[in-house]
């Protein structure tokens, strides 16, 4: 039995819904960009930003991105909140991947087939990664289309900038996916998976804000992958060596741990 194809078949509708919803959101927000270039909107944005605390501006990714007449600044700012939705999607898919078979009773179907647990974990994980890649490719294409439609970017510039954004999102998503798969191997039921997903994504996002605002807690930055890919940092520094190291360790540990735990897990039919 091909677990990979079965998982893709079971999740394609969910991926499609997320892709359509996020694509529409991105395109509509990009369509609003020309309005940001008017003098009245520029002045209003400047006045609002001047009244905010510098630490808060940094936490919100606005320390050097207040000029929303520049498309990189404008889209980079709204993208960090789109990223929250993307990470919710990828984490939720991962958390449900292994444990849902027990919750829904479909584990009996897998029991009846000549398939090893290693194949189940590998097939489901590969399917989740492929679904995530499809989502990112769709969003990348919509972003490029929006850049070309609502700015003076040429095709090469649009493709390059959007590729930088979504390549970074892919890396962060793989980290959240690894955590989700590990939890899926540990959990006994998928009930409450949505709440747990929200806690993981928004919890790490909150830790990143605390690390920026409270100087003594700056180490919390390394627990927040979404902060690693904020536009200001991404376009100037990229992803640092330490962040590559931490992320790679989490990805490997998550998938290896999930495999080892699932091998020994007492599956409930």
Image (tube, rainbow, N blue to C red):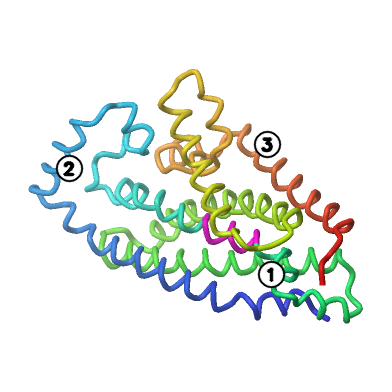
Q: Which residue is mark 1?
A: 127
Q: Which residue is mark 2?
A: 45
Corner quadrant of residue 27: bottom left
Query: Quick one: label 2, few (<14), some, or many (20+) residues within 10 Å?
Result: some
Q: Secondary structure at mark 3?
A: helix
The residue lying at 82 percent from left, 72 percent from top is 269
| Residue 92 drawn in magenta | yes
Is the C-beta separation of discs 3 and 1 under 8 Å? Answer: no
Q: Is residue 16 above or below residue 81?
A: below
Horizontal side, residue 80 vs residue 91: left or right: left
Q: Earlier in the sequence, mark 2 or mark 1?
A: 2
Q: Earlier in the sequence, mark 3 or mark 1?
A: 1
Horizontal side, residue 235 vs residue 122: left or right: left
Q: CA distance from mark 2 to mark 1?
A: 43 Å
Closest to the observer, 220 or 131: 220
Is the C-beta separation of discs 3 and 2 under 8 Å? Answer: no
Q: Residue 84's mark?
A: none
Question: Residue 52: horizontal and vertical position, in percent?
Answer: 23, 31
Q: Secondary structure at mark 1?
A: helix
Q: Which residue is mark 3?
A: 245
What's the magenta region? 87-95
Q: CA distance from mark 3 to mark 1?
A: 25 Å
Question: Residue 140: horizontal and vertical position, in percent?
Answer: 46, 64
The residue lying at 75 percent from left, 69 percent from top is 102
Q: Secondary structure at mark 2?
A: helix
């Amino acid at each position: 039995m091909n677990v990979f194809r079965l998982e893709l078949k079971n999740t394609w509708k969910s991926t499609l819904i997320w892709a359509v919803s996020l694509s529409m959101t991105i395109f509509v927000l990009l369509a609003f960009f020309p309005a940001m270039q008017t003098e009245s909107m520029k002045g209003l944005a400047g006045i609002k930003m001047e009244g905010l605390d510098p630490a808060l501006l940094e936490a919100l990714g606005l320390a050097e991105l207040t000029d929303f007449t520049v498309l990189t600044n404008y889209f980079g700012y709204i993208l960090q909140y789109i990223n929250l939705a993307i990470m919710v999607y990828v984490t939720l898919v991962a958390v449900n991947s292994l444990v849902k078979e027990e919750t829904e009773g479909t584990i009996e179907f897998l029991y009846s087939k000549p398939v090893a647990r290693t194949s189940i974990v590998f097939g489901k994980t590969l399917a989740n990664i492929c679904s995530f890649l499809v989502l990112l490719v769709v969003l990348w294409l919509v972003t490029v289309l929006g850049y070309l439609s609502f700015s003076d970017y040429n095709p090469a510039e649009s493709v390059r900038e959007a590729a930088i954004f979504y390549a970074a999102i892919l890396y962060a998503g793989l980290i959240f996916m690894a955590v989700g798969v590990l939890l899926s191997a540990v959990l006994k039921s998928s009930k409450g998976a949505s709440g747990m997903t929200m806690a993981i994504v928004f919890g790490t996002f909150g830790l990143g804000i605390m690390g920026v605002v409270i100087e003594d807690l700056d180490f919390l930055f390394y627990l927040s992958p979404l902060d690693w890919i904020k536009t200001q940092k991404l376009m100037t520094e990229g992803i640092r060596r330490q962040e590559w190291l931490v992320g790679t360790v989490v990805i490997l540990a998550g998938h290896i741990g999930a495999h080892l735990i699932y091998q020994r897990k007492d599956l409930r039919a």
